[in-house]
Amino acid sequence: MNSALYYPYSSIRNEAVLKEALLLWDHIDVITPDDEFKLVGDTRDATQALELVAKARTPSTEEKQAAHERIVALANQPLPDWFAFNLSNPDLRYLIYPQTGF
């Protein structure tokens, strides 16, 4: 069984990702905050696609604790080389509001 994990959002808003998921995966797990969280798309078609391919995936208490411990360990040491990047490189800039250039 082929599956994927969708991160970092709790809903898939990109229609291209949904189309690819329908073709490539048996299902795609979407990390959700709790078991009652409903996966809803921006359109009726997107919601139907989510119903076909997406499954809500709420991390267990043990998984949350393990993630917490790894984040604390990362924060309590010098940053690894892979974390650093050159801000003067325009290819590495992220625009908060791409439509405005900011």
Image (tube, rainbow, N blue to C red):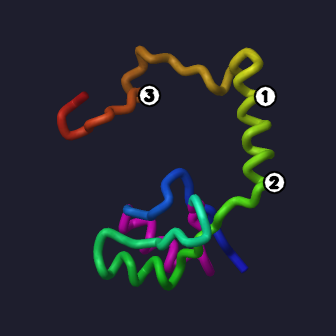
| Label at residue 47 | none
Residue 7 placement (x, y as % from top left): 56, 54
Residue at the image position 44 percent from the left and 28 percent from the top: 92
User: SS class of the residue under badge 3?
Assistant: helix
Is residue 87 within the magenta segment?
A: no
Q: Which mark is residue 73?
A: 1
Residue positioned 71% across, 34% down in the render: 71
Residue 97's place in the image compared with 80, above or below, is: below
Tag 2–tag 3 contact (CB < 8 Å): no
Residue numbers of the magenta segment: 14-32
Which residue type carries mark 2?
Glu
Cα distance in 3D space between marks 2 and 1: 16 Å
Q: Nearer the viewer, residue 93 or 41?
A: 41
Per the image, the residue denoted by label 2 is 62
Q: Would you say 48 lies left or right of 31 here?
A: left
Identified by mark 3, the residue type is: Leu
Q: Residues within 10 Å of mark 1 (few under 14, many from 20)?
A: few
- For label 3, the residue is 92
Contact (CB < 8 A) between labels 3 and 1?
A: no
The mark nearer the N terminus, 3 or 1, is 1
Across and down, in percent, residue 72 comes to 74, 30
Q: Is residue 58 above or below residue 84?
A: below
Classify residue 6 as left or right of residue 42: right
Which image quarter: residue 12? Answer: bottom left
Camera-nearest label, 2 or 1:
2
The crowding category of the residue bearing disc 2, from other C-alpha atoms within 10 Å (few below 14, some 14 to 19, many at least 20), is few
